[in-house]
Amino acid sequence: MSRLVVKITSGPEALERCNQGWNVASAAIAAGVDVSVWLTGEAVRFATPGYAATVHLDGAQPFEDAVALVLADARLTACSQCLARRDLTAEALLPGVRIAGAMGFVDEIMAPDARALVY
C-alpha cells in the first residue's frame, strides 16, 4: 500500500492553501490510504488543543474535524524547530501528536512506497 505524506506549512496567513492540505489528507484517509501529516511553520498551532476550532474557511470542512480525523486514523507530526520558535512544548500539544525534525520528514518521504505533497 502506498503512503501519502502531506506537509502543511501555513495557517491563517494562507488559509486556502492550509485547507487544501487538510482536505487532501482527509480524502486520502477516507480512501483507505496510509496518511502522515506534518505541520510546519504556523501550521504547528493546529497541534494545540482548541486552536483548530478558532480557524474557519467558508465552504471548507471544519479544521477541528480534519485534525480529529488525522489523529484518529493517521499520524500527525509537528516540526520540532517550528514548535520551539513558538515556545510550544510537548505538554502544549494534543495527545497523539508526534514531534520530529527534518530528518524524520526526509526518512518518511524517501520510503519506496511514499508520495509527498507540500501545501
Image (spheres, grey):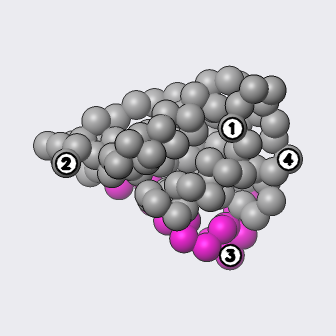
Gap in Å between the C-alphas at discs 3 and 2? 33 Å
Determine which quarter of the picture holds residue 31: top left
Secondary structure type for disc 1? loop
**Is 106 inside the magenta-drawn segment?**
no
The earlier-in-sequence mark between 3 and 4 is 4
Determine which quarter of the picture holds residue 5: top left
Closer-to-camera residue (29/108): 29
The earlier-in-sequence mark between 2 and 4 is 2
The earlier-in-sequence mark between 1 and 4 is 4
Q: Residue at x 61, y 73 (%)?
A: 95
Mark 2 = which residue? 1
The earlier-in-sequence mark between 3 and 2 is 2
The earlier-in-sequence mark between 3 and 1 is 1
Circle 3/circle 1 CB separation < 8 Å: no
Gap in Å between the C-alphas at discs 2 and 1? 26 Å
Asked if residue 84 lies left or right of residue 57, the reply is left
Q: Amino acid at mark 3?
A: Glu
Mark 3 = which residue? 91
The earlier-in-sequence mark between 2 and 1 is 2
Badge 4: few (under 14), some or many (20 or more) residues near its Cα, within 10 Å? few
Q: Amino acid at mark 2?
A: Met
Q: Residue at x 46, y 60 (%)?
A: 73
- Residue 96 rendering spot, x and y as whole percentages: 54, 70
Badge 2: few (under 14), some or many (20 or more) residues near its Cα, within 10 Å? few
Mark 1 = which residue? 61
Query: Is 106 located above or below residue 100 in the figure?
Result: above
